[in-house]
Structure formats: structure tokens, C-alpha cells
Image (spheres, coloured by chain):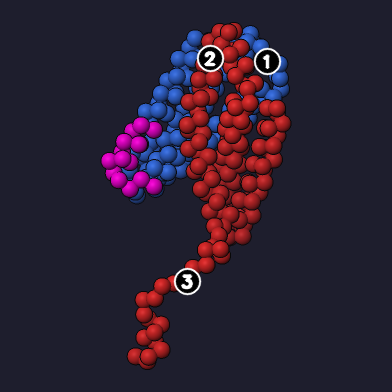
Amino acid sequence: MELSEQNVNKQRPVYLDLQQIQFPATAIASILHRVSGVILFVSLAVLLWLFATSLESAAGFQTVTDLLNSLFAKLVFWGILTAMAYHLCGGIRHLLMDLGYFEDSMESGNNSARVAFALTAVLSVLAGIWLW
Amino acid sequence: MVKNAATIGRSGVHDFVLIRASALVMASYLLFLVGYLVANPGLDYATWQSLFSGTCVKVYTLLALLAVLIHGWVGLWQVITDYIKSSGLRATLLLTVNLVLLAYFAVGVVILWGV
């Protein structure tokens, strides 16, 4: 073996420029779908409690109405709606992929992921306007 | 074919179909409920109560909660089995999550029973 080859085959540390390493949009879309799904699973406990209280009695309905007028509850509710919006957009993206509407390529995957992010941002702003 | 005892479907293909079918039910229910709330800004108790006293909306709500049970069962199985390597902790989490999902469905039945 040539000396140069030996050098190449040596176990040497690899230089990773952490500033250069970035997740593609598809990876971010995937992890956000999981995170928003877990958030929705947990928030369903809150939503079901609100649902139960609002249907229990007129006083209960008033309790829920008053609660949803507080800033903290609005922020929580806005967060839940944003998670729902993202999970819905990401889910529709997956369904469209399954139905073969998108090209099977990295570029197409990244583009549809960015569209899902943009739609979520729009829906999130609309949810904010609705709540406030 | 890969089979796993902890998923709700009997195979990956079954899970694949279940997660999509349940997603469609939940998506339509979400649009229905959010649409209703947006269309009725000054909602009062009587109107809200009469909405859920109808059989159709009751059944629709229960179908949506059944879809949540199925979708959460498959989805959280995917997340938990991907990240939790310790089999004891994984089994405990899966059991807890599935019991919570079943409880959500039961709560829905109890709530709508009284309306």
C-alpha cells in the first residue's frame, strides 16, 4: 500500500462545520408533525374538560366563556389551534403525496413542506384574529 | 409481513389505512366545529346545548372521538417506539397513552349522554 493510501484509510476525526449543517424542510416538517401530534394528544384533555363544562349547565357555559376571555387561556387556545392547523396541513400534504399528486423528489418534498409551513402561518394568524 | 401486537391495526398496512381514514373523519369534524364557532360569534348556552342534543351531532362527535382513539393509538405508537429504547418504559408509556385515549372516548360518551 502506498503511503498516501495509508493516510486516507487512517481513522481520523472528521471536520463537521456545524454552521453548515441544516435539516431539510422535509425533516422539519416530519418532526413538527410528531411534536404537534403529541401536543394535540395532551391538549385534548383540556378541550374535553372545556367541552364537558360548557355543556353541563348555563353556569358552566359561562365559566368557559369567561375563562376563554382571559389572556392566558387565549394564548393556550391559540397554541392548540396552531398545532391543529399544522397537523392538518401536514396531514393533507401526506394524503396528497399518497394520492400521487406530487413528484417523487427531494425538491418536491421540500416545496410541499414549505407550503404547509406557510399555510400554517396564515391559519395561525387567522386563529389569532378570531380569538382577539 | 411485519406484525406487532402493540398497534391497533394487525399490520403496518392496516395501520396505514386506519391512520388516514381516521384523519379524514377528524379533519371534517374540526372544520365543522370551528366553522360553527366562527359562524356563531355570540353563542349562548341554549344554542350550544341544542346543537349537541341532536342525534346526528352526537354520533358525529363520537365518531370523531373514535377516530382520535385510533389515530392517537397508531400515531403515538410510532413516536414512542421510535424514541423510547427501554422496553419497560416503552410498554408503560404505550399502556398509559392507550388508556388515556380510551378514557377520552369514554368521557365523550358520558358528556354526550347527559346532553
Question: Left or right of A98: which side holds B91?
Answer: left
How far from the left and from the top, in percent, is residue B112? 50, 14
Q: Main secondary structure of the magenta part?
A: helix
Residue range corresponding to the magenta coloring? B83-97
Question: Left or right of B104: which side holds A61?
Answer: right
- Residue at image coords 50%, 28%: A44
The circle drawn on residue B43 is 1
The circle drawn on residue B14 is none
User: Which image quadrant is residue A84 in?
Assistant: top right
Question: Would you say residue B54 is visible in this rendering?
Answer: no
The answer to if B92 sits in the magenta stretch is: yes
Q: Is residue A117 above or below residue A14?
A: above
Q: Chain of mark 1?
A: B
Which chain is represented by red in the image?
A
Read off the residue under disc 2. A53
Q: Amino acid at mark 3?
A: Tyr
Q: Nearer the viewer, residue A74 or B43?
A: A74
Read off the residue under disc 3. A15
Which chain is represented by blue in the image?
B
The answer to if A111 sits in the magenta stretch is: no
- Residue at image coords 29%, 44%: B87
Q: Chain of mark 2?
A: A
How far from the left and from the top, in percent, is residue B79? 42, 43
- Residue at image coords 70%, 27%: A132
Q: Nearer the viewer, residue B28 or A109?
A: A109
Q: Amino acid at mark 1?
A: Leu
Mark 1 is surrounded, within 10 Å at the Cα level, by few (under 14), some (14 to 19) or many (20 or more) other residues, namely some
Q: Amino acid at mark 2?
A: Thr
